[in-house]
Amino acid sequence: MTGILHGTLHGVGVGPGDPELITLKALRILQSAPVIAWPAPLQGDSMARAIAAPHIDARNPGDEPVEIAIRMPMVAERFPAQNVYDDAARDIANHLDAGRDVAVLCEGDPFFYGSFMYLFGRLAEHYPVEVTPGISSLTASAAALAAPLAARNDVLSVLPAPLPETELKQHLQDSDAVAIIKIGAHLDKIKTVLMELNLLENARYVEHATMATQTVRRLADIESAPYFSMILVHKRQNAWREN
Ligand SMILES: C[S@@+](CC[C@H](N)C(=O)[O-])C[C@H]1O[C@@H](n2cnc3c(N)ncnc32)[C@H](O)[C@@H]1O
């Protein structure tokens, strides 16, 4: 392997949902990459591909990219099937070996809990890699809620909901502001913990931030949460209004 003949592996953040919320750099890569790979559920559409669709589908006839679907279970509580990533890494490596750049799409930002890192882990030692950061769901959710995430010297923690109840409680006690991601089947546990800490009324819920289906509600009113949803809690509710 001589390195210089290889294509570059791009991890491309496509933002949280609104196709306008991608960077100019991501746009350039979407318009020019010869190969584009994207994660998708076992059945159904890929969120990352759907976000990028207006940009990829606008390419001229004859300039369409080769596309690779990486299908895996998209559930909050399960770690990804390693064999899916092994197979995808092999497919991608074949293109890189042939000198073709490969763009791997990632909803939000590739290095903020993004599945791109499983391919990065398998390929980064062997091929040139460039990561294009994206607007993450964390800042998109705060914008959707019209509520700053953290102010002044606040400590902000990101908590994956599958964590055990005791750990969630500890982190909530140790932080001023908290974002809870990957809610899925853990909604009741989260509500219980927040209630015990007397924080349920401080919890704001956002679903599908920046997408056409964006929904913002009090957590207390929510009975089920889809994959793309998040809870933001600030202990001092409107801390940014304080002098
Ligand atoms: C595996 S993480 C990926 C995060 C993504 N890479 C990012 O930068 O936002 C998936 C979790 O991010 C959160 N998430 C992603 N997009 C979202 C959106 N548009 N609205 C609300 N939450 C979102 C959800 O909590 C979801 O379970």
Image (spheres, helix red, strand yellow):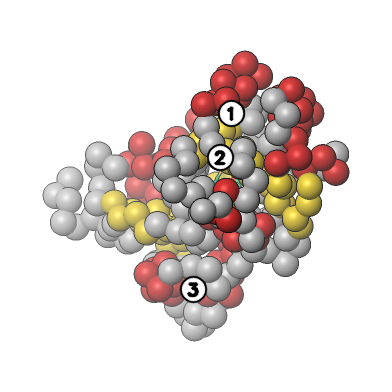
Q: Earlier in the sequence, mark 1 or mark 3?
A: 3
Residue named by callout 1: 172
Does the CB distance between marks 2 and 1 fall below 8 Å? Answer: no
Secondary structure beneath dot 1 equals helix
Q: Could you tell me which secondary element the residue under label 2 belongs to?
A: strand
Asked if disc 2 and disc 3 are in contact, CB closer than 8 Å, the reply is no
Mark 1 touches mark 3? (CB < 8 Å) = no
Could you say which is closer to the camera, residue 55 or residue 182? Answer: 182
Q: Which mark is residue 64?
A: 3
Residue 226 lies, with reference to residue 172, above or below; the image says below
Give whichever of 125, 25 is nearer the camera: 25
Residue beneath disc 2: 177
How many numbered marks appear?
3
Q: Amino acid at mark 3?
A: Glu
Q: Earlier in the sequence, mark 2 or mark 1?
A: 1
Quarter-of-image position of residue 24: bottom left
Residue in the picture at 59% in, 61% down: 143
The image shows residue 72, relative to residue 131, as above or below, that is above
Q: Residue at x 76, y 28 (%)?
A: 195
Q: Quadrant of the N terminus?
A: top left
| Residue 97 image position (x, y, % from top left) | 28, 52
Q: Residue at x 56, y 40 (%)?
A: 177
- Disc 1 C-beta below 8 A from ligand 1: no
140 or 64, which is in the foreground?
Answer: 140
Beta carbon at label 2 within 8 Å of ligand 1: no
Identity of the residue drawn at 40% across and 49% down? 92
Q: Quadrant of residue 101?
A: bottom left
Local crowd at mark 1 within 10 Å, few (<14), some, or many (≥20)? many
Residue 78 in sight here: no
- The amino acid type, in three-letter code, at marker 1 is Leu
Q: Is residue 32 above or below residue 2?
A: below
Question: Of tags 1 and 3, which is closer to the observer?
Answer: 1
